[in-house]
Each structure stands twice: as C-alpha cells, then as structure tokens.
Amino acid sequence: MSRSAHPAGPRHADVIAEGHYTPPPADLNALDPKVWSRTVTRGADGAVAVGGIEVTRLAEEFGTPAYVLDEDDFRARCRAWADAFGADADVFYAGKAFLSKAVVRWLHEEGLNLDVCSGVELAVALAAGMPAERIAFHGNNKSAHEIETAVAAGVGRIVLDSFQEIARVAHTAERLGRRQRVMIRVTVGVEAHTHEFIATAHEDQKFGLALAGGQAAEAVRRVLKLDGLELTGIHSHIGSQIFDMAGFEVSARRVVRLLADVRDEHGVELPEIDLGGGLGIAYTSDDDPREPQEIAKALHDIVTRECEASGLRSPRISVEPGRAIVGPTAFTVYEVGTVKPLDGLRTYVSVDGGMSDNIRTALYDAEYSVALVSRTSDAEPMLSRVVGKHCESGDIVVRDAFLPADLAPGDLVAVPATGAYCRAMASNYNHALRPPVVSVRDGAATVIVRRETEEDLLRLDVG
Ligand code: LLP
C-alpha cells in the first residue's frame, strides 16, 4: 500500500547484488521526521524519546509490544486539517483508523467531527461525549439495531449505501418521529491506487450506488419522496493511501455533475458533498504525502470551478481523513527476541509482536520503516526482515530494512507510522494479547487502551 516500490520478483542475494533495494540510509541512527511523529527525538544518551519520555522508560513501565501515540502530533494534525479546510467545510476524522474515548475527546476539543462505521464505534463516540450531530454514520450493511440507535441518538448524517437501507432508515425515522439527515454514497467510477488512479468497472465493489447506469439518480428520487429523510448531499470515497489528487478531482467533478442533474430533475440544489478520506502518509522515506493545505485548495478549486460551470452554488465540502491524522502519530515498540542471520540473504529479527498487532504488511504488502530506539550504534547496516512470533512464515512486520549489525536480543526497535489500522485491525491470533495504546505528552504517559490480559481472553471462552 505504501508508495515505495518493492523489488519485483524473488527477494534473494542476486536481487540485492543487482541493487534493487533502496540503499541503507547514510546514518542508521537518524530518524526521518517524515515517518516519525513530531515530538520524537534522540537524546544525548542515544535513546529515543517521544513527548519528552524515553522509549526505554515507556517499555519498562508498560511492556512491549506497545503502541505509543504522540498526543501533540495528533492534535496538531487535527488543527492542520481544520485550518486548511476552513469554516465553510467539515473535517470528519474516520474512526475506523483508530478509535478510543481519549481520541474522541481530543477530536471534540480540536473541533473535528467523527465518522463511525459500526454501532460500537458510535457507542464509543457517544460515551466520550462527542455530540451526536457531529457524527456521520457509515456502513454498507447497517443492522436494524444500529440504524435505530443512530437515529434515536440524533446523528448528524447517515450515509445511505443501498436501496434497502433507504427504506430501512426512512421507516425507522418515521417510527421514531424524526426527520433524519442523510447523504447518498455514490460510486463514481474512479478507483484510486497508491500512486495512480484507474477508471474501473465501478459496479464491481460492495460500496455505494453507481453514478453510471443511474442507480445513484434513482436513489435520489426515492430519498426525496420520503418524509422521514432529509437529503443533504452526495458522498464519495475513492480509496486509501492515495498520493495523487487526480482521482479526487475526477470524483469531485462527477459528484458535482450529479448535483446539477438533481437540480435539473427535481429543482433542488443539494447543499453538501462529502469527498471521503484516503489521503496517503509516509511509511518510508520514499513516500511524499500531500499537506492538508494543498489538498484543501485542490478540492475547493475543482468544486468551485465545476459549480460555476453548471451554475450551481458551491456546496459545503466534507472530508474524512483517518490515516492522514492518526497514522503518523504513533509507533509500535517491540523488544528483539532473536537475531538469525541467513548467509547471503538477510537477517531475521524476531520481535515480541507481529501480524497480530500489524496485519498490514501481510495483508497489503505494506512497507514500513524500523529503527533501533534503545541506543545508538556505529555498526554496519544489516539487511533485516523484522518478523513476529506467530506460527506463520508470512508473519512479517517490516519486509526489508536496515538495522545495525550489532543488534541483539533485548534491544528495543520501533516501527513508525502505525497509528492507523494497526491497533484497529489487531487480532488475538495465537491468543496474542492485543497491545496497549499509550499516549504521551509533555513528559506524561497515559494508557488510553490497556493491554489485554490472559483473563480477558479466558473470560470470553465460556465453553
Ligand atoms: N471514509 C470512508 C467512507 C472510508 O471507507 C474510509 C476508509 C475513510 C473515510 C478513511 O480512509 P483513510 O483516510 O483512513 O485512508 N485497512 C486499510 C484501509 C481501509 C480503509 C477503509 N475505509 C489499510 O490498513 O490500509
């Protein structure tokens, strides 16, 4: 998923000799600010610190593996997105990337809205005091219970994803005596990939109602007839870990065209559009993500231009960044357990976590960086593969990276940019206990999600 290229074909000594690998960085002790959160520094004694606390201390106090989240960085990214989009747009943090009550409070304090995609995400948001009107509820198969809870709570918008759901939400709203604000999620026929976008057979996926073929227009017709629903606009989300703005521009253009069609057919100008999330972050030094300012300007410009061309008032724009806010704010710290050099190939470095705390490498072939964080080293770079402790050879955390050749059991290594979709997608494979999330700020550390315990898992096992 990361933009950095994998060497094609077999990854063995010949490939290394042919120079298909990114060469080792000039200084293995340096921490590239592109991939590490803002308050990460290396202290005089060589240990890495974040939020004013040394990682060695965090590991001692909270154990490993652990996700360490830089609260200042998280808040700064929230503000950067909110400032870039300004008062006439809405930024919804996509909670699926990582959600906890502390995060919801930070979002609330920084003035962001929240996108949830399950009843339990909604419960977390409400429990942490996010006002319901600032919550958008997503999902392609919301249950009757989820719909009822969302409508009863008064969520600001439900994003409708199918004809069945239009009827279900309308029925629930009418039964509860509510008029629910809704958007229709459309598939615009753009599938965005990491560094390109391809126009695809838009029907061939589970989300949304296709613009082509008229499903989206039919959805608008149906929603406008229902008393229980107030249609506020059109939603589109084109993919994830995207660097190229071209896909968003095509999407914005097609969504605005639908607004014009709706005006022509129904005499109604829908006031809002939501262009989804999906902005990429740097997982390695090769990745060059866009800044929120640049993204906001590109989206505003295209929407304004298209609206002017169609004689429409510019709608209020929403965006839903998840990864771009939380991804860069956390790293995972592991303790090295074994170091196994394979002659002419690479060295396998086994850590005390693995695919249960970061499935992204195995699932998406995602690339990550890694660094020794408990000390510095002047040893030669050693081509390494950081692997977990699970009973599976695909249990890889970092496929190809350089670590110092004197790496030894007991050293701490950290993998940056694990804030998004790592704890959120963590599993109990091999009955691994899911790691804690520890937030740090101004010299203080707080467990915001605690480590699972053996008792937690045994309690579920009621056979
Ligand atoms: N809005 C909607 C409707 C979405 O479906 C998503 C992500 C987002 C916003 C946020 O996207 P983001 O800005 O975080 O890329 N597990 C995958 C990513 C799946 C994203 C699903 N939807 C990964 O680890 O890369």
Image: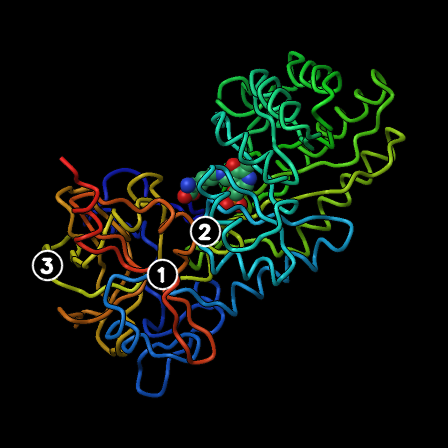
Asked whether residue 196 appears in the rendered view, the answer is no
Give 415 or 172, whichever is nearer the viewer: 172
Q: Residues within 10 Å of mark 3 (few under 14, many from 20)?
A: few
Q: In the rendered view, would you say 53 is above or below 338?
A: below
Q: Nearer the viewer, residue 89 or 375?
A: 89
**65 to 434, vertically: above or below:** below
Q: Is residue 149 visible?
A: yes
Which mark, by number, is residue 99? 2
With 318 as the anchor, is 288 left or right in this view? left
The residue indicated by pointer 3 is 340
Q: Return the residue at label 1.
A: 437
**Residue 76, image x, y percentages:** 58, 66
Question: Could you tell me which residue is drawn at 63 percent across and 28 percent down?
Answer: 176
In this rendering, the answer to whether 319 lies above or below 163 is: below
Instruction: Return the residue nearer the eye: 228 or 17.
Output: 228
Residue drawn 36% across the image and 59% down it: 449
Q: Which residue is at a point 68% across and 31% down the rendered structure image?
A: 180
Number of callouts: 3
User: Does dot 1 land on a helix, a strand or a loop?
Assistant: strand
